Each structure stands twice: as C-alpha cells, then as structure tokens.
Amino acid sequence: MFIRDQVIAWLSENVSDHRLQHILGVEQMSIQLAKQHGIDPHKAGVAGLMHDLAKFFPPTQLLQMAQEEGLEIDPICQTNPHLLHADVSAIVAREEFGIKDEEILTAIKNHTLGSPAMCPLSCILFVADALEPNRGNTPELELMRQVSWENLYKSVRQTCDFSLKYLLNTHKTIHPRTILTRNWALETTRNLAK
C-alpha cells in the first residue's frame, strides 16, 4: 500500500530541501494535469512523488544499480550517470516502497529523457517535471504551462524543445532519446490535428 508520509520522510533524508519542494510541485502538477486529461490522478501523484528518489545517489551507485537491474547503459549514460537517476528511481520505488504498477514505474523511468510512444501518464510526469511552479514563472514557462492543459503531446514537444535549447546553450551532451521523443510528440500532434 502506498503511504505518502513514508515516502516524504524517506525523501527528507535523501534529497535536499530544495529538491523536495520541486518533487512536491511535480506531484501536485501531475495530479492536476491527470484530472485535466482524464488520467488516474492517484497514479500521477505517486509517480510525481517518486520520480526523483535517486536524484542524489552518487554516480557509482547509479551505475551499479542500473547494471544489477540488467539495464542497457549506453555510452552517454556511462559518461553522464546522473541520466540514470530516472531508471534507478523506478527501482527504488519498486524495492523500497513496493510499487508494482508498471505504468507508474515506466512514467518514473521516462521522466528525464522521455521515450517515443509514451503513455499519457508518462507524458504528464515528463511535462510536470519541467513545468512545475518552482521552476520559475518566465513568460515562456507560463505559456508552456497553458499548453500543457490544452494539448499534452504538444506540451511534450515544447518541453523537449525547451530542454534541447538549454542543453545547446550550456554545451551539454544531448541524449538521442530526447530527440526521438520530440519527433514522436511532434508527429503525434500533427496526426491528431488532421
């Protein structure tokens, strides 16, 4: 059984106060978006609350847990192990808190890089992670939040674009999955508009 207080107590011991505020923001935005788009709000809340369980795990621990789980670790994740925190957070959700719902676990796994053909719950968490209120209130973010209420797939595409611009401007590595996710969301939006 999911016990929210237990998860928050665990998070208080394992993430910074700033990160905990972000996590709670993602939880609330995930619930609101789920209600807006006809998705189970309880599942969205659980996924939101647990998406960053492994955010502060050291790189060696992330790599070790991913290897023990039998995950394929591509060269980009090998060099940037923090990208594995999404997959490892899903492992912690399952092992530490008994989450068995594959849709919730998959949403947690996909919240950083996305994935082509994501289910609506994964889309909600992906968008909420980027747009929750603690991320700021620039005009660009406010506009993106408005789109998230109206069109989930367009919002995924915008979130990918936003992330890609940031990665390009800061000269950081871009994982191909983000590009694949963006292209899928773009195509899905076009197909729905036909």
Image (cartoon, rainbow, N blue to C red):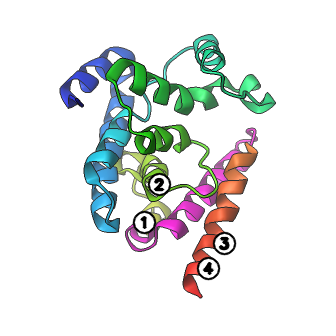
Magenta-drawn stretch contains 162: yes
Check the picture and name the quadrant holding the N terminus: top left
143 up-or-down from 129: above or below: below
Q: Earlier in the sequence, mark 4 or mark 2?
A: 2
Q: Earlier in the sequence, mark 1 or mark 4?
A: 1
> Pointer 1: what residue?
148
Disc 2 from disc 1: Cα separation: 7 Å
Q: Which residues are magenta?
A: 145-174
Labels 4, 2: front one: 4
Q: Position of residue 193 (x, y in %)?
A: 56, 84
Disc 4 from disc 2: Cα separation: 20 Å
Q: Earlier in the sequence, mark 1 or mark 3?
A: 1
Labels 1, 4: front one: 4
Q: Position of residue 61 (x, y in %)?
A: 58, 12
> Pointer 2: what residue?
127
Q: In the depicted view, which residue is nearer to us: 2 or 26?
A: 2
26 up-or-down from 194: above or below: above
Dominant SS type (magenta): helix
Q: Circle 2 — which element?
A: helix
